[in-house]
Image (spheres, rainbow, N blue to C red):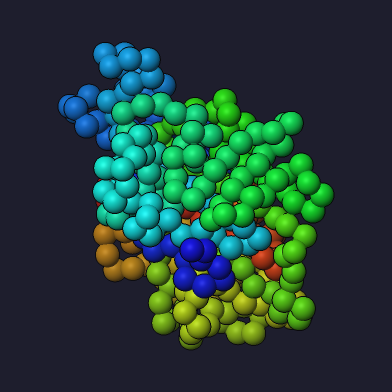
Amino acid sequence: MLVGTGALLGLAGCTELSDSNASSTRSSPTENAPTETDTADTTTTSETDTETEEGPGYKQYHWHGRLFFEIDGTLVDFDQPKYYLDNIEDERPETVYFHFHDGAHGPNEWSNEKRIVTFQRALNLLPDIGYERRDGAHRITYDGTTYDGSRSGTDVSIHRGTERIDPTTYEVQHDDNFWISIQTETASGSGTDERSGKLIVDVNNRRLDFGADARQAGSDRFEFRDDGQPYTWYSAGDPVTLEHALATVPNVSYEQRDGSHVVSYESGGDHAGTYHETDDATQIIVRERTTPVDPTSYTLQDGDVVWVYVHTANAPDNEH
C-alpha cells in the first residue's frame, strides 16, 4: 500500500531522534549522542557499542529511526499489519533485527533489536521489499515490481540523513533517518499550472495534525484542502516560500534569528513553546527530502516533500 498525495503518516518518531547528519542553514552537521532503549538494564552506551556474549554483532540495545520510502512522489505506508513484528516474528524470527510496530508513533518509525545489520539486510527483512546492488547500481523490489537503477529512465537514490550510502556496507545505527527515492520515466505531472506536495512537521517525534483549521486557512497561492489528504498542500499562481507556507499552518510559525531556525508551536499542550536552534539540547531540521533548505528563500516546487523536525529537551519526548 502506498500513501500518495493522500493520507500520510500519523504520529511519528522515537526516543531521542536527532539525525547525526542533520544540517541547517547556519552551520555544518553536528554530532549528537542520542540514547537508545536498553532492553536489559538502564545503562546507556554509544551507537557503535556491541555485545559479544551471543556472538559477533549481538547488541542488547533497542534502536529506532525513520524510513521514508518514496516511489514517484508517493510514500510507502509502513503502518500496516504485514510489517508489524507481532504478526511476522513467529514465521520469520529474524525480522526482530529490523521491523515496525503497531504501537510506534508513526508508520515510518523502524526498530532494530539484538543484532547490528547492514541496511541491505534490513530492507530484505521487510515483507514485499528486496534490495541488491548489481554492477554498482541499486536494484529494489517493492510489492512485486523491480526498479533497477542501471536502466534508462529509472533513478534510485538511498540516503542516510543528507549523505548517500551503500546499503551493502552501511550498518544501521540508532537515530538513522533513511530516505529511499525511486523515480521513473512513467511519472508525470498534473498537466496544470497547479502545484502540490507534502508538508510534514514533527515536534519531539509528534507529527502535527494540521486539522480543519488548516483546511480553512490560506488562499489559492497556498492551501490545504478537505480531501482526505491532511499533509498535502496545493499552490497556484506565483510560487510561495516555505516560510509563507508555514505561516499558513495554524499554531505554527517560523522565523530566523541571526541565521538560525526558530519554530513556535502554540498547541496549548506540553509540546507548545518557541524553540531556538541555538539553544542547548535543541535541534531543528528543515529539508526538502534530503536537502537542507532555507525557508525564507526556498520556494515550493511541484512534488516537493518538506520535512520540518524539532527535537528538544525542553518538551516531553515520545517513546516507542
Residue 37 placement (x, y as % from top left): 27, 35
The picture places residue 230, in percent across and down from the top left corner, at 47, 74
> Hey, which quadrant is residue 113 in on the image?
top left
Residue at 50% across / 75% down in the picture? Answer: 229
Say whether residue 56 is left or right of residue 170.
left
Residue 247 visible? The answer is no
Indicate whether 155 appears above or below 118.
below
Q: Residue furthest right?
A: 152
Left or right relative to 65: residue 159: right
Q: Position of residue 285 (x, y in %)?
A: 52, 48
Rendered residue at 49%/39% (across/down): 124
Up the image or down, 91 lies above or below 103; here it is above
Q: Nearer the viewer, residue 239 or 55?
A: 55
Above or below, comparing residue 180 to residue 223 in the picture: above
Quick one: 8 or 210, which is closer to the camera? 8
* Whether residue 126 is visible: yes
